[in-house]
Image (tube, rainbow, N blue to C red):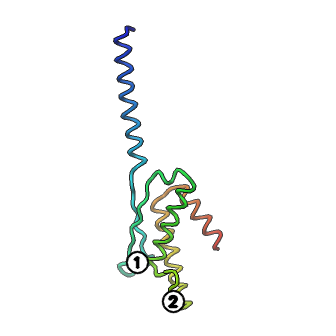
Amino acid sequence: MTRLNSALVLRRTSERLTAGVAAIAATFLMVATVEVRAADPAFDAPRISVSYQDIEFATAKGTAKVYRKLQSAANKVCGLAPGGKLTLEQHTKAQKCADGALADAVQRINRPMLTSVHEASARKVG
């Protein structure tokens, strides 16, 4: 192979590699959202959008952060505000709603690490 051909092959390989790396980086930096909605299909349930980046699921810390965001949204959408004054019956109903909304959001996101965090959290509570 001549020097000119070698340089051309290297340049093309470098261009393909750069394009591939750019495509992978774009995939990891995608921002996604999921709506957390109250788990009562009887009426037009309130919803809260939660934004996250796909790359957050690459680490346990990032996954836990997304899970906390989802928990917070589920609690808000179902009326479980910190310091809120609910009767025991209202609290039980709101907790059931939040648990359902959180489970629904985790299922729709469908990430193994997030599902594991959710299952571990459910075992602690249950």
**Is 126 located above or below residue 109 in the figure?**
below
Residue 123 is tagged as: none
In this rendering, position of residue 126 left or right of residue 81? right
**Is 25 located above or below residue 46 in the figure?**
above
Closer mark to the observer between disc 1 and disc 2: 2
Task: Say which amino acid is labelled 1.
Answer: Pro
Q: Earlier in the sequence, mark 1 or mark 2?
A: 1
Mark 1: which secondary structure? loop
Q: Residues within 10 Å of mark 2 (few under 14, many from 20)?
A: few
Per the image, the residue denoted by label 1 is 41
Mark 2: which secondary structure? loop
Residue located at (50% from left, 86% from top): 84
Count of marks overlaid on the render: 2
- Name, please, the residue furthest toward the front: 83
- Name, please, the residue furthest toward the top: 2
Residue located at (51% from left, 89% from top): 85
- Name, please, the residue furthest toward the bottom: 87
Residue 99: x and y in percent read 53, 74
Q: Residues within 10 Å of mark 1 (few under 14, many from 20)?
A: few
Nearer to the camera, 30 or 35 = 30
In this rendering, position of residue 36 left or right of residue 60? left
Per the image, the residue denoted by label 2 is 85
| Quadrant location, the N terminus | top left
Task: Say which amino acid is labelled 2.
Answer: Lys
Nearer to the camera, 46 or 86 = 86
Q: How far apart are the two marked residues, 1 and 2, measured between alpha carbons?
A: 25 Å
| Quadrant location, the C terminus | bottom right
**Is 86 located above or below residue 70 in the figure?**
below
**Is 9 located above or below residue 111 in the figure?**
above
Residue 80: x and y in percent read 50, 80
